């Protein structure tokens, strides 16, 4: 164990976060996401929710300030988004000062970004459209 690092962050995830550079992207996906067939490194975090992991990693992870650092999948035509999912993620990342906006892109554009991501972390999240992409920034 390391001091001040959440026990929710596995050694593999900690190593991955440290290896990422400015502009690299990481996906925190729900349990339904086709991570293993998309291509990049996949890290399993079964049993954890995306919001719990976001809360654990954000003290260690600087978000990009030059490009939209948060991206989620837009609803497919005919589906509806549950706004509590986005609120939960923003709360996990920013607490009460959640002023950051999340960009929404269509499903296939999100899959394309995921193919080029540094890693995908598959969680036990069951919320529909519960995937979020984070773009790493420069540590001040």
Image: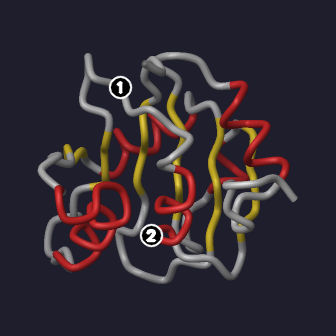
Query: Is disc 2 placed on a helix, strand or loop?
Result: helix
Image coords of residue 119 (percent x, y): 65, 39
Left-right relation of 13 to 54: right
Image coords of residue 57 (percent x, y): 56, 52
Q: Label 1, on which residue?
A: 64
Left-right relation of 21 to 67: right
Image coords of residue 37 (percent x, y): 70, 50
* Label 1 – label 2 distance at C-alpha: 19 Å
Left-right relation of 109 to 29: left
Left-right relation of 31 to 47: left
- Residue 82 lies in quadrant: bottom left
**Nearer the observer, 103 or 105:** 103
**Nearer the observer, 133 or 11:** 11
Counting other residues with Cα less than 10 Å from the Cα at mark 2, is it few (<14), some (14-19), or many (20 or more)? many
Image coords of residue 122 (percent x, y): 64, 62
Quarter of the image containing the C terminus? top left
Question: Which residue occupies 48% across, 21% down?
Answer: 139
């Amino acid at each position: 164990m390391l001091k001040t690092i959440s026990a929710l962050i596995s050694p593999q995830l900690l190593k991955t976060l440290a290896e990422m550079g400015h502009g690299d992207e990481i996906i925190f996906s729900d349990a339904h996401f086709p991570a293993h067939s998309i291509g990049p490194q996949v890290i399993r975090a079964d049993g954890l929710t995306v919001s719990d992991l976001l809360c654990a990693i954000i003290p260690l992870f600087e978000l990009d300030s030059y490009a939209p650092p948060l991206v989620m999948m837009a609803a497919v035509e005919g589906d509806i988004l549950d706004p509590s999912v986005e609120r939960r993620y923003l709360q996990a990342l920013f607490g009460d000062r959640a002023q950051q906006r999340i960009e929404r892109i269509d499903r296939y554009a999100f899959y394309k970004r995921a193919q080029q991501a540094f890693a995908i972390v598959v969680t036990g999240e069951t919320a529909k459209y519960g995937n979020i992409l984070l773009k790493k920034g420069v540590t001040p």
